[in-house]
Image (cartoon, rainbow, N blue to C red):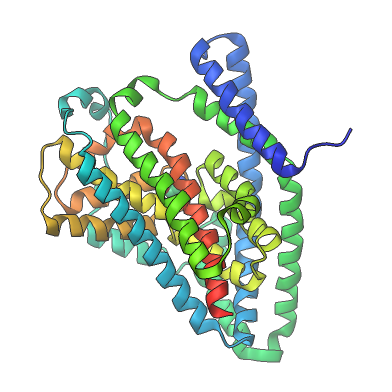
Amino acid sequence: MKLPSLNAQILIGALFGVAVGLLFQQTGIESTTASSSLYAATIIGTLFIDLLKMILIPLVFCSIVVGIANLRQHQQMHKVWITTLIFFVLTMAIAMIVGMAASTYFKPGSGLEVSMFEGAMQNFQSQQMPLPEFFAHFLHNLFVNPFQALAEGKVLAVVIFALFLGIALVMGGDRYKNILVLLEEGLEVTMRIVNWIMWLAPYGIAALLIKLVATQDGAMLGTLAQFVAIVAGTLLFHGVIVLPLLLFLFTRKTPFWFLQGARQALITAFATSSSSATLPITMRCATEQLNVKPEIAGFVLPLGATMNMDGTALYEAAAALFIANLVGVDLSFVQQMIVFLTAMLASVGAPGIPSAGMVTMVLVLQSVGLPAEAIAILLPVDRLLDTLRTTINVEGDMTASLVVQKIVS
Ligand code: ASP
């Protein structure tokens, strides 16, 4: 019997995961069948994420060095840099404007009172993170001993060191050609391993979704329904209208073509809630299915996975306005601008791991004097919204790689 294609298997896995998760949520997770199934789902889901994380660091390292080296040969380095950064900032800004406009219009949270959430807020200690400290911390984490960064999986520091090494190799020219060949082969062989890991993807994705859906707290969801609907609606608007429109305007590629090639990465992002863990698959989809040149993908995607977060930026900005409504604070125009800027900074600084946006959101709240403890209110729905915002983050990265490729070619 012929198995369905990997694309179809992944889709079936995702639907199966959501369906079984919903079933367990209805029947309760205490029964023996449910708890042993959840145990198995945890093992398989964790194994899948561990495998992706295993290959992540060698992949990021080799792909950036090789990407830079190849770009320099074409004398386009400068243009790629600038276009990438401009596109990242542009799409994050659009996402935040849409999120903030919808929040201002619908005013989620104005019917609710903070006292309704006292239970949630009691057991929660927010970590204070004033802006200057956050910035210093961010800078400090950029330049790290490369062996430490590689060993501890610090993606951003690995990206930075790989940028240095890539530039040094090019400037050295022929002298270092063996190192470059070594890394080129390293990249090829890591992609081969990614292809193997992909065979586990349908099962890993099903397992992750079963666990996520089954353990979702339904009660709070009702109270926060309006906020969840606004964030989910605007995230979808960004993912279904804004990004495809930009893609079409710049490259003339249709959304269907994009979806077909990007599907595996988008579903994985949804299930793992981690742009970094998804990166090996994002690179695979971009280079093998969306025809992005390896040197562009190798540069734009790893950088995007840690810095370009449209979904996170939108969420942080909308959540800040929601909390302001909840505590009855009317934010002035200047304060809204501060929310806009800090939400962008906070999402650039958030690592591509689950719930990272939630942690850096403290910064946004503090910047306009809102109580940082209030993020406890959002905790019950954070995992749910994280699935969507991570999907949009990854979609934004892939869109950026296609647009940058078109502009510099
Ligand atoms: N989970 C998101 C990501 O990996 C970050 C966030 O928490 O918003 O892209």
Asked whether residue 303 is in view, the answer is: no
Residue 268: x percent and y percent?
A: 59, 44
Frontmost residue, 185 versus 260: 260
Residue 348: x percent and y percent?
A: 38, 60
Relative to 320, does residue 183 appear above or below in the rendering? below
Quarter of the view holding residue 2? top right
Residue drawn at x 17%, y 28% is 111
Relative to 56, does residue 322 appear above or below in the rendering? above
Residue drawn at x 71%, y 66% is 187
Residue drawn at x 50%, y 17% is 25
Quarter of the view holding residue 319? top left
Image side of residue 354 versus residue 9, left or right: left
Q: In what quadrant of the picture does the C terminus appear? A: bottom right
Asked whether residue 87 is in view, the answer is: yes
Residue drawn at x 48%, y 77% is 81
Q: In what quadrant of the picture does the N terminus appear? A: top right
Image side of residue 49 versus residue 189, left or right: left
Residue 270: x percent and y percent?
A: 53, 41
Seen as rendered, the residue at the extreme right is 1
Frontmost residue, 89 versus 357: 89
Number of numbered labels in the structure image: 0
Residue 37: x percent and y percent?
A: 63, 19
